[in-house]
């Protein structure tokens, strides 16, 4: 069973300098109870992708073509109200910045109660559910915590509270948008383990966005590599990391010498700049920075299956 | 240096064009021009002497003879409104200029002078700001008696702290900047640095702020004259007309209409103009106030 | 935060002291002999001399200032000339009327300004937003005394919906409220514009915040997000704005009291000027200044009370 299947998704933003083609022909799947990682530099379109799935694209953005099928419904063609009804109960999100993710002037308990606004439970039952969730994310003295405000918790605790809120309605899919980037290394490990435990317990799928290769390798079953609004490679984590078939993936892994042992905070730098998405280059999106560029790269490469389930958008993959 | 001078000029021209594309800006310009025209050509436009008392014509409603009617002394209100515009606009212009000059000088002293003087002046500015405007005006009138001088002094006291603060902040920032340090090292004198390097950088935003304060100044003059604390009778002033009409508001409402409408038109005109000017010339100031 | 509060309080004391100094020098500069003014033309030289001694005018100027300063801090503002009653008592009698008027003005401005600003922010870029923008600028620009006179003309004289003058029957709260409606509208109308603009700007900022995105991602309804999650934060700066605004509203209140013939400190000081009752003038100006300075302090504390982030630092 597939929870989320994105097919040939194109997202365009209308800007003063012309249309910005933020996502081009993005396709991948998130199977049931699996953790899928998305990796890429900042500006690669990860945030746009999340917003497109959640139906929260900025006003100047639109889904030009393609489909986002989630539990059998196409989110790309659902009206705002219908998507809003999915957000929370079926489709939930944890964002990067734990400091700003919670409303500063509403108590934690009230925020958690508000998330359950669709439920018919009595107030006390909702609070009991909130306390139960806070316990699961190991917040000490959970009953008391409901009365407190976000600023009274540490960064790591805030992120765990955000996770508790996101999982409270037992969604089918959790989108985790760099949930550990703002945390220090020790907290990162515990938060990742917590996420893994909760995922197994609730049985949801997770779309885990990170630019941290080590975390992706450790946590994710599948990985999707994005560059400048395109999925350049996707497949099982073992396949993609073991046999990188797109030069961009290879460069990412090359630049990360300690990729199995030591955790790097940031993606390694690759010479050159991201292309201007308002004037998308004719052929391969990575050609300008690629050290294995060929003449054929002036045309857009097709998605080529290296082995079943492992796909790379590169002519080189053909020869393998 | 000289090549760069034409660029601001072109930028200014472009800004004026943008101003004329904003409907609100055009509306403001129209109102202001209308009022200025009436004030400048007041003698030529008015058929009657503004102060000519004519007991037979007292309390006449608006008619073709008297466009805005007459007051309790039979004076033609249209002529008085036009001449009142002269008072209002010249007071506004004069006291704003005075505030600007004093504000700039005090601000430069505070920003460029020794630290203790700066602190002392800031305290002085804060203290003046801590008086509610009307209370300040009333206290000053006690001192000077009702007069236009009192009005001008009130305006200057109300405006100067704000202007001086802006100049001070800008001066402090520029004092540390590279081109001032460079000029200093080349032996330029302090007055020269202030005139050549500091002033051109601060005058633009200040002028925009001052233009936005003009409605406030007009309101102060009219308000004080309404209370009988501004211009002395029989000098025509919009506030004084309001005062004349107010005592007879039940029977002759056209007098307060004649006094109030020009105040509304002028303050709206200058405000719309000032707002648009600010947005067009200096978006950084947006959201102030 | 505590040391900041103490610092602010210290600054307030210094400002009030400087204000006292300025007021005192003003009294000193007033042309004419205060004793002669107080007693009128028919008083004898001996009577004037006696009053001068009583008022301390025979002492050196710095002694006079010191006495004025010490007495003022103790609440003794001297006696007013006409009835020889303590100025402080007279001012405090009139103060509640002015406070009621200003509170009325705040109520109008908050009741109209916050919804308008919020509406404009939610409908950003629409004709509604532009209309609110133009209206805000317009009500800010028009002087409050013109608003007062025109409100009187339209609602009290022409339509006769509301009473024109006075503060209403003492003890009859309903009557007093009815009498408060027009004058307080005149006081608060300009601030509808300020508050609408402020709320709009801070709403737009808050709506961009990460926690609003989180709330949307949890599928919370738009109404809940706008009013409970965003507006509660967006109105915080309004409190500070009102702290500053009360000083301006005090100015408007003076006009409103005169136009609507209401009792209050504005009417008091105006009448005092017309009757050359100088101790009453300086006393009233001083009291209102102290109130103004204090209110700015209080506004900061209220912000602390509304915002748990600030509160926790106390």
Image (tube, coloured by chain):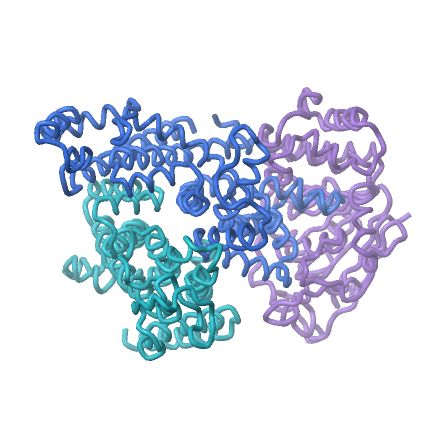
Q: Position of residue B38 (x, y in %)?
A: 37, 74
Which hue is chain A drawn in?
Answer: purple
Q: Position of residue C264 (x, y in %)?
A: 41, 36
Q: Colour of chain C?
A: blue
In the image, C163 versus A115, the foreground residue is C163
Q: Is residue A217 above or below residue B212?
A: above
Comparing B148 with A105, the one in front is B148
Residue B122 sits above or below residue C312 on the image: below
The tint chain B carries is cyan
Q: Is residue B217 visible?
A: yes
Q: Residue at x 12, y 30 (%)?
A: C48
Residue at 82% of width from left, 42% of height from top? A205
Residue A204 picture quarter: top right
A289 to the left or right of C84: right
| Residue C31 point in image, percent of width and height | 15, 43
The answer to whether residue C307 is left or right of residue A25 is left
Residue B79, x across and y down, in percent? 36, 71
Q: Residue C263 is drawn in which quadrant?
A: top left
Residue beneath the point at 75% across and 32% down? A113
Q: Is residue A3 above or below residue A63?
A: above
């Amino acid at each position: 069973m597939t929870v989320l299947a994105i097919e040939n998704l194109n997202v365009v933003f209308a800007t003063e300098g012309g249309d910005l083609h933020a996502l081009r022909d993005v396709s991948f799947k998130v199977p049931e109870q699996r953790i899928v990682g998305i990796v890429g530099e900042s500006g690669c379109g990860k945030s746009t992708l999340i917003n497109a799935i959640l139906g929260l694209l900025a006003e100047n953005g639109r889904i030009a073509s393609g489909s986002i099928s989630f539990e059998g419904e196409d989110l790309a063609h659902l009206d705002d109200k219908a998507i809003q009804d999915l957000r929370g109960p079926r489709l939930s999100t944890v964002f990067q910045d734990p400091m700003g993710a919670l409303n500063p002037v509403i108590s934690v308990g009230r925020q958690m109660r508000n998330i359950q606004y669709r439920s018919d439970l009595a107030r006390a039952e909702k609070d009991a559910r909130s306390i139960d969730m806070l316990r699961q994310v190991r917040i000490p003295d959970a009953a008391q915590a409901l009365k407190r405000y976000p600023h009274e918790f540490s960064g790591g605790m805030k992120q765990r509270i955000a996770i508790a809120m996101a999982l409270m309605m037992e969604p089918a899919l959790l989108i985790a948008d760099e949930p550990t980037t703002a945390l220090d290394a020790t907290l990162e490990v515990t938060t990742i383990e917590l996420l893994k435990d909760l995922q197994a317990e609730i049985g949801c799928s997770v779309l885990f966005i990170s630019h941290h290769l080590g975390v992706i390798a450790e946590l994710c079953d599948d990985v999707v590599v994005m560059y400048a609004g395109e999925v350049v490679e996707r497949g099982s984590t073992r396949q993609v990391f073991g046999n990188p078939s797109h030069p961009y993936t290879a460069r990412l892994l090359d630049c990360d010498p300690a990729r199995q042992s030591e955790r790097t905070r940031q993606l390694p730098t690759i010479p050159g700049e991201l292309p201007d998405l308002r004037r998308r280059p004719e052929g391969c999106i990575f050609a300008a920075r690629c050290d294995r560029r060929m003449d054929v790269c002036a045309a857009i490469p097709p998605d080529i299956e290296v082995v079943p389930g492992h796909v790379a958008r590169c002519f080189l993959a053909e020869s393998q | 240096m000289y090549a760069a001078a034409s660029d601001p000029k072109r930028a200014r021209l472009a800004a004026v064009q943008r101003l004329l594309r904003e409907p609100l800006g055009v509306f403001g310009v129209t109102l202001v021009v209308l009022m200025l025209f009436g004030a400048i050509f007041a003698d030529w436009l008015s058929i009657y002497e503004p102060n000519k008392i004519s007991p037979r014509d007292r309390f006449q409603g608006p008619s073709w003879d008297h466009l805005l009617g007459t007051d309790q002394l039979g004076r033609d209100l249209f002529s008085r409104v036009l001449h009142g515009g002269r008072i209002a606009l010249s007071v506004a212009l004069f006291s704003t200029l005075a505030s600007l000059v004093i504000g700039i000088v005090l601000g430069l002293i505070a920003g460029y002078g020794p630290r203790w003087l700066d602190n002392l002046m800031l305290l002085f500015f804060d203290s003046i700001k801590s008086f509610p405007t009307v209370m300040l005006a009333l206290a000053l009138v006690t001192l000077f008696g009702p007069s236009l001088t009192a009005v001008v002094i009130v305006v200057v006291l109300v405006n100067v702290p704000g202007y001086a603060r802006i100049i001070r902040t800008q001066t402090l920032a520029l004092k540390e900047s590279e081109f001032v340090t460079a000029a200093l090292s080349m032996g330029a004198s302090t007055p020269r640095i202030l005139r050549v390097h500091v002033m051109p950088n601060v005058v633009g935003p200040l002028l925009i702020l001052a233009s936005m304060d003009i409605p406030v100044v007009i309101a102060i003059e009219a308000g004080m004259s309404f209370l009988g604390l501004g211009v002395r009778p029989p000098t025509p002033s919009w506030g004084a007309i309001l005062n004349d009409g107010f005592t007879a508001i039940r029977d002759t409402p056209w007098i307060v209409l004649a006094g109030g409408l020009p105040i509304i038109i002028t303050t709206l005109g200058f405000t719309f103009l000032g707002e648009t000017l600010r947005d067009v010339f200096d978006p950084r100031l947006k959201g102030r106030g | 935060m505590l040391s900041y509060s103490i610092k602010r309080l210290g600054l307030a004391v210094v400002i009030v002291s400087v204000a006292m100094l300025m007021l005192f020098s003003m009294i000193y500069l007033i042309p004419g002999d205060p004793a002669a003014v107080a007693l009128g033309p028919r008083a004898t030289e001996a009577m004037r001399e006696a009053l001068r001694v009583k008022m301390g005018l025979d002492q050196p100027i710095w002694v006079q200032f010191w006495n004025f300063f010490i007495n003022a801090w103790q609440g003794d503002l001297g006696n007013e000339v006409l009835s020889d009653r303590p100025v402080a008592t007279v001012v405090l009698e009139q103060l509640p009327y002015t406070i009621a008027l200003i509170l009325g003005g705040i109520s109008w401005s908050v009741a109209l300004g916050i919804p308008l600003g919020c509406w404009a922010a939610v409908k950003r870029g629409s004709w509604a937003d532009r209309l609110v923008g133009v209206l805000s600028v317009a009500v800010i620009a028009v002087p409050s005394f013109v608003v007062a006179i025109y409100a009187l003309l339209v609602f009290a004289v022409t339509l006769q919906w509301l009473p024109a003058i006075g503060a209403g029957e003492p003890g009859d709260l309903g009557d007093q409220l009815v009498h408060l409606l027009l004058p307080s509208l005149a006081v608060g109308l300009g601030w509808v514009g300020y508050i609408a603009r402020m709320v709009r700007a801070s709403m737009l900022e808050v709506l961009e915040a990460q926690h609003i995105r989180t709330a949307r991602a949890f599928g919370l309804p738009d109404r809940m997000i706008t009013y409970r999650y965003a507006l509660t934060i967006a109105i915080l700066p309004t409190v500070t704005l009102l702290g500053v605004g009360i000083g301006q509203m005090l100015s408007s209140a003076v006009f409103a009291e005169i136009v609507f013939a209401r009792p209050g400190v504005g009417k008091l000081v105006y009448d005092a000027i017309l009757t050359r009752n100088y101790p009453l003038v300086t006393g009233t100006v001083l009291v209102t200044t102290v109130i103004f300075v204090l209110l700015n302090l209080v506004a900061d504390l209220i912000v602390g009370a509304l915002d748990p982030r600030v509160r926790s630092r106390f």
